[in-house]
Amino acid sequence: MALREWFANDQAPATEAEQKLRQLERLANVGALSAGMAHEIRNGLVALKTFTDLLLEKNREAELALVARRDLERIDSILSRMLKFSGPVRSTASAISLHETLEHSLRLVQRPLEAKSITVERIFQAAPGLVWGDDIQLQQAFLNLFLNALDAMEANGTLTVKTRPLTPAAAAPARGRDRGAGQIAITIQDTGAGISANNLARLFEPFFTTKPNGTGLGLAITRRIIHEHQGEISVHSQPGRGAVFEIVLPAAAGPEVPPA
C-alpha cells in the first residue's frame, strides 16, 4: 500500500499519524544509512585485502602495516558515526596536509592501479597545501573518487591528481565561510569511458548507478563529506574523453583555531 493511501485509510488522530510518519521516515533513513555504511566498509575491506596480500608477499615492508592500521581507524570512525546516528555528529576539524591525505588515499588503491598498469600523475601546486577538515573523512571522499576512476579506465590509463591554490581575491564564496586564507582546488581526472549527459545530471543522487553491482552511494557520500567541509564538488565529462572531478576546499593558514 502506498504511503498516501495508508494515511487516507488511517483513522488515528493527526498527532498519532504524524508519529507514524516520523517513524517511517526514520526507518527509511536507517535503511539508507545502513546501505551507505555497507558501501564504505566494503571499500575499506578492499584496501585491507590488498595490503594483507602485500604483507604476505613482502613481510619486510613494515610501513604497509601502518597503512592497514590507518584504514582500520577509518572504518572504526565510520562505524562510530553509524552508532551515533540518533545524535548530532561533529567532525574533528583541524589544519591538515591535503597532499598527505591524497597520498594516503592513493596508497589504498596502489595495487589495483598497478594491476591495470595505470599511471598516476601528481601535480601538487598548492604549497603548503593545508586545508581545514577531518583527514579520515576527506580520505574517504578521495578514495571513492579514485575507485570510480579505476573502474572507469581500461589498462594503461592515466589518473591525474592536481592541486592548485585559489587566492582570496579569485576564490568563490565557500559554504558558510568568507574567503579568508583562500581556497584550494583539487582536480581528479581519468582517461576512462566518460559519462553521458543524462547520467552526468544524476551522478550525485543517492542510489543512482550505472554499474551492475554498484550501490549508487559512493559519489553521494563524497558530496556530503565535501559539503560538510564547507566545500564544493563538480564534474565535467564527455563520452570517450574521461571524467574530471573538481573539489574546492577552504584553505588553512596554519594550526590556529579554524574560523567559525
Image (cartoon, rainbow, N blue to C red):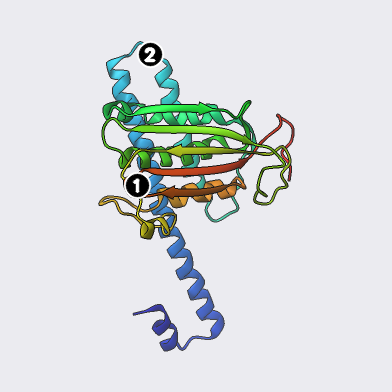
- Provide residue 70's location: percent of width, then percent of height: 47, 28
183 left or right of 196 in image:
right
Q: Mark 1 points at which residue?
A: 194
Which quarter of the rendered picture does the N terminus lie within? bottom left
Badge 2 crowding class, 10 Å Cα cut-off, few under 14, some 14 to 19, many 20 or more, is: few
- Provide residue 214's location: percent of width, then percent of height: 31, 50
- Provide residue 4's location: percent of width, then percent of height: 42, 82
Residue type (three-letter) at the residue carrying disc 2: Glu
Q: Name the residue under label 2.
A: 61
- Along the viewing direction, whichever of 223 and 15 lies nearer the viewer: 223
Q: Which of marks 2 and 1 is in front?
A: 1
Q: Is mark 2 on a helix, strand or loop?
A: loop
What is the quadrant of residue 150 in the picture?
A: top left
The answer to whether one can see residue 72 in this image is no
Kindly identify the residue that appears in the image at 53 percent across and 77 percent down: 18
Label located before the other in sequence (2 or 1):
2
